Image (cartoon, helix red, strand yellow):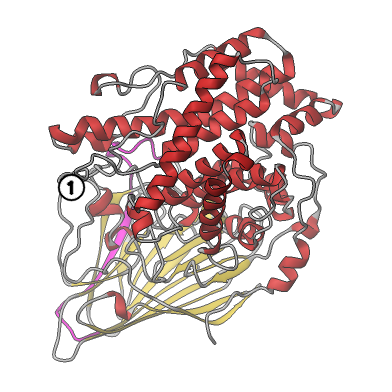
Amino acid sequence: MPFKLCFLSALLCARLCQAENITSWSSLIDTTRAQPSLTAACDELVAQARKAVAEPIVRRARSLAEVGQNRTWLDGRANALEDEIREQFALAMSDFGACSLLAKELPMLAAAYRLTGEKLFKDHVIAQLDEMASWSPLQRPGWTLYAPGHRLPPDGKDGNWLATGCGIRALGDTLELLPSDALDDQLRARLNTLLETEIAGVVDDWLARRPWFVRSNNPVTNQWVLPTEGLVRACLVLGVDTHRDAYELGVKNLLAALDAHGPNGEFEEGFGYASFTVTSLLHAAHAMAAAGDRRAIDHPFLRHFPTWLVHHFQPGNMVINCFDAGGAFDAAKSTRPLLSLLAVCTNDPVARWALAFQAGGPSNDLGGLAARGLEPVGADATPPLFAAYERAARVNWRDSWDDNATGVWVRGGHPLDQHDHQDRGHVNFIWKGKPILIEAGTPSYHHPLMMTQYTPGIGHNVLQLGDAAPADSAKAGELVWMPGWQKAGGVAPISINRLDASGGDVTVDATKCYDRLQLWKRRVQWDAKHLAVVDEVQLAPDTADIIMFRWHLGTSEDAIIKEEADCYTLDFNGLRLSIEPSAPIEVSQIKLPDHTLEGHTGDEDPGNVHTCIVVRSREKTHALTCSLQAAPAE
């Protein structure tokens, strides 16, 4: 059976209702304030604003010594760079950090002033806007210098980037929320000049094909989307009629980004990057729609995306954390701002259902405040329990939406994957809310083990040929690859033999992801009580090597492994795991770094580990068939 979406798109489309009467944030706040039932929610936002206004304003770092001061951020990757480029990279990334912070904080303070009329909020906002008016450009050059050996082009420019979008969002939302007479003419003129400069800079980047994502025509990446959001929003603030060509360029690029994603709402960079990038897409689409231009807000990708996002929610308070998605435990709550924004901008019933029943309610920000004013949804908004996504190369399943349910997800590989790991064929299994088989997860990019223990195959439940061990360290941003490991970006199609409410039966063909390999097919079968994985491996003709599998367990405790006549067994969380090979194997256990389970305390904590079972052929061999069975222990 060919790989296809396993629920009816027509049914899904019928349940999605089109958002009408998109209004500005100022109108949404005014409407919210007029509803007595939302007084407490308004008070909560104002209370948050009081905490924020007690902080000093964010001031731009002008030297390496100032990065990390005045509420700015030092990207840890700067520490590994040569002296020649360290400061420029650190300053560029601090621009992104500062603008990202203010995109959340400034509109909240402006909304608090609109709600209360209290002068302290207005004074703080004006002081911050006065500071920002001197940040030209909002994104300084240097963001491409993230790895040793990188250098800027001869003209010293690498283009507008993330700070452009976040900074203009902060300005646009804030100016929209403030009363028209809140700013004096001089400050408003300075901000308008800043926005004019930003428009000219983004347009020039596309005309000159300066940034890498423009040269390679890669609209999927957030690096394309954020400056595009900035261009669209700046034109809307200053007036589309006077910036028509720039605005249409921005809309064209925004629609290209929306068109680039999967037809069923798949975002090719996974759960974590989707949360960041789609937030930018929605802010731009909302601003356009509020001005009467619905070309983006009505796009099919945004209509289907909420269900794809919610399908990452797994039992046990976990999420599907393939790609550079961070940790898995308790991560569903991190989607509250995006789900709230989706609910407000698209009126999507699945987003509203997830907020009410899975994510802990709307977020404590502008989007969440507006979402609290929406009509509640019922059980008819509940999304399907299972799906297969071709562009995301993933199957996901759970037997109920209860937190103590059983859940499975399986990864393939698509040629358009970005920000992905060497995880083709990975199987994840949660049984009755308890993690059984997991992956290592994703720490911060400056983590010393990121490219050696997390991203490569060693961090996932996949095949390895040979005994090559991971290197002890790697340069920042440099993926370690050795013969016998998965190749980056490999294509691994998933065939669906069966996928329904009772369970699934799928096969991943990851043969093309390895050198010297003639066949690796992994068949995964499951229901609410059992999981079976059968691996069939054949090396190229006249080739023999050690054949190895890793199985990452959802625990840091030692496993008790018993060797029996024809198999190995271990008991874990009420299940018995049995490993049966077609040829002699050795089974051992090691501790590997963890960024998936509950309780990880930080990127550098050596205590963040979990147990990994290593299965390897005793001798070099040409072929091996090996099965792993998980069933309730007797």
For image coordinates 23% across by 68% down, the residue present is: 485
Query: Residue 50 placed where, x, y %?
Result: 61, 14
Secondary element at tag 1 = loop
For image coordinates 18% across by 47% down, the residue present is: 475
Q: Which residues are magenta?
A: 599-623
> Which amino acid, mark 1?
Lys
Residue 591 in view: no
Q: Nearer the viewer, residue 356 or 402?
A: 356
**Looking at the rendering, in which quadrant would you find the N terminus?**
bottom right
The relative height of residue 614 versus residue 403 in the rendered view (above or below) is: below
Q: Nearer the viewer, residue 546 or 68?
A: 68
Residue 426 in view: yes
Number of marks in the rendered image = 1
Badge 1: residue crowd in 10 Å (few <14, some 14–19, many ≥20)? some
Tag 1 residue: 475
The relative height of residue 426 versus residue 249 in the rendered view (above or below) is: below
Query: Residue 421 placed where, x, y %?
Result: 34, 60
